[in-house]
Image: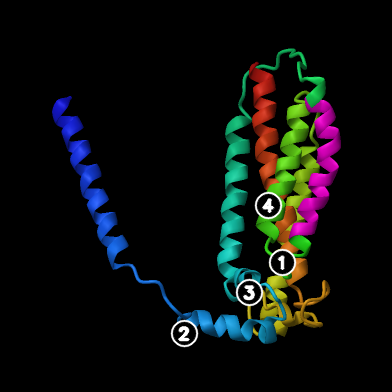
């Protein structure tokens, strides 16, 4: 045991020395590198989005974003499949406090509206589909916490998720066919920089991502809650 502890201490010390050397050699860049400077300078004209991060995530590296959404979709499906084989259903009392129920009734509508606002305005301000979807997923989680025995319409979640993903792919293919590449947002007019209806198809793309992420997270929580009710 002492030898094991000594090895752990040595490894931690070695790692500390390594980090200190990295810190000593670190130099803050005074200017953007060539790639970053190009995107920072040309994104507003090429994409029409004032949020450069959004433009990069949704258009320039749209295939990567598709992969991220796909991974989350597979995670939701695997969790649902594993939890589907829970124990026999038993009666369970709802012991949720009145404070939580009241708070949920007040916060859930506003949280959903905030989530929608975040992904609709993702091309203008910090935020976007993943962030807005996470907010919506949090609202559904609060709904389940307030009423764990209530029935969340998983079928509605699955249909919304499927339609959002399918439409996302169609928009990507439309960019490939009618513009410059997959998820090219110029299939719609770029509009005026800074306006809500600008940046071509980016607001629509981010709205679909927000709905897809929100429903996938909600499906995971609903599946866990459903299994908990059966095995309680």
Residue 9 at x, y percent in the picture: 21, 38
Dots 4 and 3: beta carbons under 8 Å? no
| Residue found 69% across the figure and 66% down from its top | 169
Residue 26 versus residue 41 in the image, above or below: above
Dots 3 and 2: beta carbons under 8 Å? no
Which residue, given by chain and number where applicable, does mark 1 sit on? 125
Residue 83 at x, y percent in the picture: 61, 31
> Which is nearer the eye, 49 or 90?
49
Is label 2 in a helix, a strand or a loop? helix
Q: Which mark is residue 34?
A: 2
Dots 2 and 4: beta carbons under 8 Å? no
Q: Which mark is residue 161?
A: none
Which residue, given by chain and number where applicable, does mark 4 sit on? 213
- Which numbered disc flags the more N-terminal residue, 1 or 4? 1
Quarter of the image where the C terminus is located: top right
- Which numbered disc flags the more N-terminal residue, 4 or 3? 3
């Amino acid at each position: 045991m002492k030898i094991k502890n000594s090895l752990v201490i040595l490894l931690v010390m070695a790692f500390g020395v390594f980090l200190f050397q990295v810190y000593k050699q670190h130099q803050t860049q005074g200017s953007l590198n060539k790639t970053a400077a190009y995107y920072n300078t040309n994104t507003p004209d090429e994409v029409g989005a004032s949020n450069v991060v959004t433009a990069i995530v949704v258009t320039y590296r749209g295939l990567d974003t598709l992969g991220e959404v796909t991974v989350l979709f597979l995670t939701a499906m695997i969790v649902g499949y594993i939890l589907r084989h829970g124990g026999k259903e038993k009666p369970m009392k709802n012991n949720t406090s009145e404070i939580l129920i009241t708070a949920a009734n007040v916060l859930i509508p506003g949280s959903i509206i905030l989530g929608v606002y975040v992904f609709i305005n993702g091309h203008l301000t910090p935020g976007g589909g993943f962030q807005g979807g996470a907010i919506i997923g949090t609202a559904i989680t609060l709904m389940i916490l307030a009423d764990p025995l209530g029935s969340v319409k998983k079928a509605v979640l699955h249909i919304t998720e499927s339609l959002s993903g399918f439409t996302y792919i169609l928009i990507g293919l439309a960019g490939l066919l009618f513009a410059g590449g997959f998820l090219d947002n110029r299939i719609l007019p770029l509009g005026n920089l800074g306006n809500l209806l600008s940046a071509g198809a980016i607001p629509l793309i981010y709205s679909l991502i927000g709905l897809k992420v929100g429903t996938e997270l909600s499906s995971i929580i609903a599946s866990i809650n459903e299994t908990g009710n059966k095995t309680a």
